[in-house]
Image (cartoon, coloured by chain):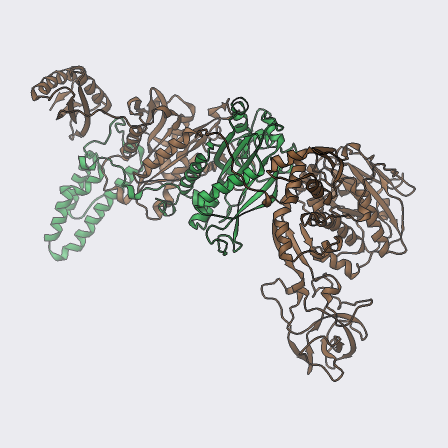
Chain colours: A brown, B green
Amino acid sequence: MKLSVKEIQSLVDFKLPSISELTKFIGSQLGQVEGIIDLAAKFKDVLIVKVISVNQIDGSDHLNACLIDDGGVLESIERNKDGYISVVCGAPNVRSGMLTTYLPPESIVPVTFNQPQPFKLTAKTFFDIKSFGMLASEKELDLSDNHEGIIDLVGDYQIGQSFAKTFDLDDQIVEIENKMFTHRPDCFGQIGLAREVSAILGHQFTSPDWYKDVIKDDKSSNQNDSLEVINQAQDVVPGFKVSLIQNIEVAESPLWLKIKLTKFGIRPINNIVDITNYMMMLTGQPLHAYDYDKLRELSGDHGVKLIARRSVDKEKLTLLSGKEIELEKDFIVISTDKQAVGLAGVMGGFNSMIDENTKSIVLEAAVFDMYLIKKTSMTYGLFSDAVTRFTKGQSPFQLDHVLSQTVRLVQQLNSNSAKMPILSANIINEKLINPIVQVPYSYINQILGSNLNSEQIIKFLSNVEFEALDQSNTEVSFRAPYWRTDISIKQDIVEEVGRLYGFDQIEKINLVREQIPSQADFNFILNEQIRSFLSARGANEVLNYSFIPARVITNSMSELDHHYQIKNALSPDLQYYRSSLMVSMLDKIHPNIKLGYDRFALFEIGRVHSTYLGKNDKLGVPDYQRRLSFIYAVDDKLSKKIKGASFYFAKEYLTQLFDQLNLSSGIEFLTIDKIDNKLWADNAKSYSAQRSSAIFYNKKLIGLVGEFNKSVRQSFKLPNFLAGFEIDLSVVDPMNLRPKYQELSKYPSIIRDYCFAVSQSLAFNDVFSNLRDSIIKFTEPSIKINIDPIDIYLKENEKLKQITFRVKFTDFNQTLSDEIINNITDQFVEDLNKKIEAKIV
Amino acid sequence: MNFSNTKIDQAYKSLNEEFNNLSQKNDIFKSITLKKLYDELKVIPKADKPEFGREINLLKKDFEKKLAELMNSDDDLGPIDVSAPFDLNIDSNQHPKVLTADLGSKHPLMSELKIILDIFGRLGFGARESLELDDDYHMFGSLNFPEGHPARDDTDTFMTFQTDDFNKPLIAPAHTSSMQNRVLVDGLKDLTELNKPIAMVIPGRVFRNEDLDARHEHTFYQIEGVYVDRNVTVGNLLATLKTFLQTYYQKELDFKTQPFYFPFTEPSFEFSMSCPFCDKKGCNICSMSGYIEVLGCGMINPNVLTMAGIDPEIYTGFAFGVGIDRLVMMKNNIEDVRHFESAKLSFLRQFK
């Protein structure tokens, strides 16, 4: 919202502080200052001058040699003997004796002021005649698009006077962020802003007389001989008033009015539209003017009617802008009894707009449901100053005041016009009168942490024209003025007081409370442990988007149907919630390899969503899984030097991690056909069936580890040496998250290596677990055993593979002898042979 | 494939046989047969060398191609024993190992989050995670966004085709405030029965349906703070934020508030701190203004408390929300917010 310092100054009865001081107050007590437009600088050199003589230049078809009188104010400029300045001017309307605007040499042409290279005037020569500076049109001064001639100032203006001072252009425009005014329609007008500025500077504000009172008893009729207004949508049109003015003349606006509008960046159009726009800038109330005669032609045989109603499906309307829209039902249109003439609150219709032939106008001031206007604007992509304001929720009590004042201004510019009384299509709803809000002084201080007395509190609010109805030693009742539609509970009063007092004035007092240890979610502790663990093992933590495109899902051979799907994403890459972390990871391998990273490991801790997970009853929303995913990649060149499947590299990380998280004892690696869960089964489709494994913990499926199948590798341009895992982190037990300690023995251990030849078809784990069981079976409980596999060997063309284990025996009661170990060995070797036909080598 | 040189032709045939029997197919390049060919190259007459060399190369290329084809075909990769800790026939010094620690890194956003959680932990705030897929009630209704409120229609909230129990689309939360109601509801019992204030921070991912550029991400991290007790004041809110920021930057700072509008707090503020990087002298980070707007905050709206079953006549509280990405960007001079979720190693490995 733009605030004009001059306009505000004219509405208050004290002198405003400097612009820097003013914006500081506005910033801390009204809303964020987004910028300041320095109009004073833009117009500082423009002078009012008189044209003394005009002589057409020989040889030119349109240029005139002019002499102008600047009242002698310019210093160091070349003058003739009479003290006049020579200027060449091509404007058709230049004539001797006229007052106009002049840009001296070295000044910047205002219309170029904000361009990257502003145009600076110099002395020039045309047909041997020197020209100093230029006489300016409205376009050159950036006041309108009119470039037909130079400005013709009619009236009593002083020669040599600054144009900016004369027309209040020595002004600053402060731009304030709109967000603060979400429910402050009053702050979309200069009157509302002046009121706020007054109060934050500690001054009483008084609204202009024509704006003030609540009209509770509306006696307006809804029709007269010329016009009838009807409101068929009372629920979404709380106020709908019009005034008919006859015998007007649509013309260019006077300069002062054009200037008032251009300050706010609104282009002047004509004297009617400009007044409605000016009133909107003043009060925040948008208005619309219809051509009465056009309305009559658009009406049926039963007189001219203006109706506020809901749109019907497929109804067509051509807007002022020329754009034709086809409406859906239930928006609001303004209509005659035959056809729509405007899209309420958004834009007028082309068929009823005023033009240079218009003789009578119908001025409309109305209030519409803010949410419906917002929806209309979004649905049809129509944005306007009116929409910005109508979506803030004006008070219908403003309509009479604004409409009456607008009519007065129109009549000032059209002295022959005749008005008719205001017609109203609504009965004022008593419910819209602001409620009385009672608030104890102590409550205000208690919330703010302030120490304000009753006088201060009442003063803050009366400065913005709140009415203190009842006051006692302990509390006060306020009724907010009608233009404030945001005050209904005592917290609203607290906010007003705090803001007008200045929140920065409030002493910052630390919370005082009993010492209660804070509880952190276990997940944060777990995350931290995993991050430290994996990054210490050379892996890099990544964060990938929660949303993925369909491409990633299909490339990973997963099904689309169980993914939550985004319906309104601007970017085509954000289509689905991911149901596995791995798919995002696979998409990030190739780019890193391309950049020359030949060996790396990535991991992510994140969430997956899928309709397979159902609803989380405690949260009442779709459930999710917290997961860790990890991937190990080596580019094709380097991987030639690596022996063995990539699978085991991912598994190595996983095994170490399980140790760290104290899960190892319950873990099993089974083939992926053992998956008994829809989500994991779908996730598993990216993995290579023969080179991956389902991970079970205490018989429950918790994840996958493995290499990826050919199709996935090709789709994501993956290197051959690539394996990863993904696990559900809910399996980790918060109560058991610590390394497992083994007591130290005072006695030396004995280490023996055993090599067994077993059938090639026997899985490693079958050998390992049988061996472990056998050793334990024949060993005293006081002897602890550690078994480490050190080699697995399969000779070419042989049926048996050889697995070597290193076994460490540690006794806690005595020093072990070779004899004891030999004895144990004989027994478990025989046992193992019986169980799995393992032969010791 | 046929070769004009009979030695090479023979060698090719025996290499093929070898290749088929190898478990580690790339060992073919270490084959004695191949080595012998190279040895042969050294001793043959000079004139024959170019042609001989060309054919050896062709032969080698043929095996490279075979190897590549094999690597790209599942069937030929063959089954492995997934229960084993390492592959067959691997020397113990080639057993799988983890990478060296110098390569590793932690994501800067997560590291910063830990620092922030630690500070709030010391201030007595508990922590819980926010949701990435939530419902309309927690995103809007419970936060005092009336039905039909313009912010609900804002195109910048992601919604799903799937709906909740009330037939409304599910929502990717645009702010962590969507957790306020849950935190209040869960803390209600302790608050009213044990006089334990609700003191919680809730970090999490949030989403805005925006076009990406160096300053705008559709996915970023926020941390929400909620505190409710008897007699909690605006002064307490401002003091808590001051303490947090001064601890975080480890220096004295100045603060400014700016009135703002959020449906779920009243009064609402934007909170600015004096620039910790230039001490108000003006720098690129604070856009030469000396101040940086860091967070939105306010006193929890009584309607929000009421909807969680907390009596606003007895209890008051405050809430605030901080964007973590921006804090990290400012602290490390990171020029582009998109780096965070790019998984670029050149970015990640700078954060050891």
Mark yes or no: residue A572 visible: no
x, y percentage for residue A723?
A: 32, 35
x, y percentage for residue A197?
A: 69, 50
Which residue reaches farthest left? A819
Which residue reaches farthest front? A473
- Considering the image in quadrants, where does the C terminus of chain A appear? top left
Q: How many marks?
A: 0
State whether residue A765 is above or below residue A324: above
x, y percentage for residue B82?
A: 27, 27
Which residue reaches farthest bottom? A81
The front one of B344 and B81 is B344
Dividing the picture into quadrants, the one containing residue A684 is: top left
Q: Residue at x 70, y 68 (%)?
A: A46
Q: Is residue A508 left or right of residue A256?
A: left
Q: Residue at x 82, y 49 (%)?
A: A405
x, y percentage for residue A408?
A: 85, 51
Q: Is residue A396 left or right of residue A817?
A: right
Q: Residue at x 84, y 39 (%)?
A: A424
Mark yes or no: residue A16 visible: yes
